[in-house]
Image: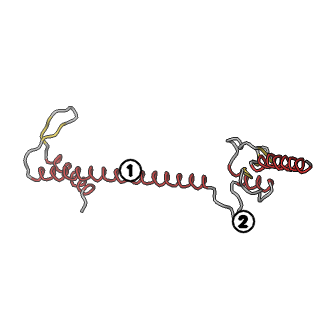
Amino acid sequence: MPTKHFFLRALSSVIMLLAVSTPAAAQWQWVDAQGKKVFSDMAPPADIPEKNILKRPGMSAVTKPPAEANAAGKAGATVGESGTKAPDPAAARKQAELEAKKKQAEDAEKAKLKAEEQRVAAAKAENCQRAKTALAALATGTPMRTMNAKGERIFMDENARQAEKQRLEQAVQQNCIR
């Protein structure tokens, strides 16, 4: 019978070791908002950043002390084995989005300027055509009418024709591309 008693005692010890070691293997470690190291068999709250999680179930033990983890967390990046800062994927993604928005805004501004230049060019072309047509009509020598200050139609005399010719020639010079 002593062998049976020994066997039961050994079996209960093995079961107890398994029961104790299983929760230890499923242990989480993280640094909370106050900088304290927390151990739990439950996952950390959602507000704990990924960089503050020190150990997950199935991971090996912590490779750096919590003070270093906390300092790295405050710096905004983790320090790798080479000693250089690893880029934060979220920050890199945000930077790429900002650059894309900046490029899009610049492209929109360029398109707006180009559209404005085209509108001005079209207006100049129209003004050029009107001035040339009016100059050609003045050159024929036919009597032309205009409106006076009272809104009455009157025929242009020679002085008025000369002033209108000068004004139209100036409009041709400003609006027509040579």
**Where residue 158 sits: x, y (%)?**
14, 48
* Residue holding disc 2: 81
Whether 159 is drawn above or below 149: the answer is below
Mark 1 secondary-structure assignment: helix
- In space, the residues marked 2 and 1 are separated at their CA atoms by 50 Å
Q: Position of residue 18 (x, y in %)?
A: 79, 49
Q: How is the image coloured?
A: secondary structure
Q: Which-is-in-front pick, marks 2 and 1?
A: 2
Say left or right for 163 vs 116.
left
- Which dot marks residue 112? 1
Other residues around mark 2 within 10 Å, as few (<14) / some (14–19) / many (≥20) = few
Q: Which of marks 2 and 1 is nearer the N terminus?
A: 2
- Looking at the rendered structure, the kind of residue marked 1 is Lys
Q: Label 2 sits on what residue type?
A: Glu
Q: Residue at x 19, y 36 (%)?
A: 148
Q: How crowded is mark 1: few (under 14 residues within 10 Å), some or many (20 or more)?
A: few
Judge by depth and name the residue closer to the eye, 84 or 155: 84
Q: Which residue lies at the image location 7% right of the left edge and 47% below the top edge?
A: 142
Q: In this view, does 87 lie above or below 9?
A: below
What is the quadrant of residue 151 in the picture? top left
Give the farthest residue toward the bottom: 82
Most foreground residue, 28 or 136: 28
What residue is drawn where x is 70% and y is 58%? 78
Residue at position x 60%, y 52% in the image: 90
Quarter of the image that includes the C terminus: bottom left
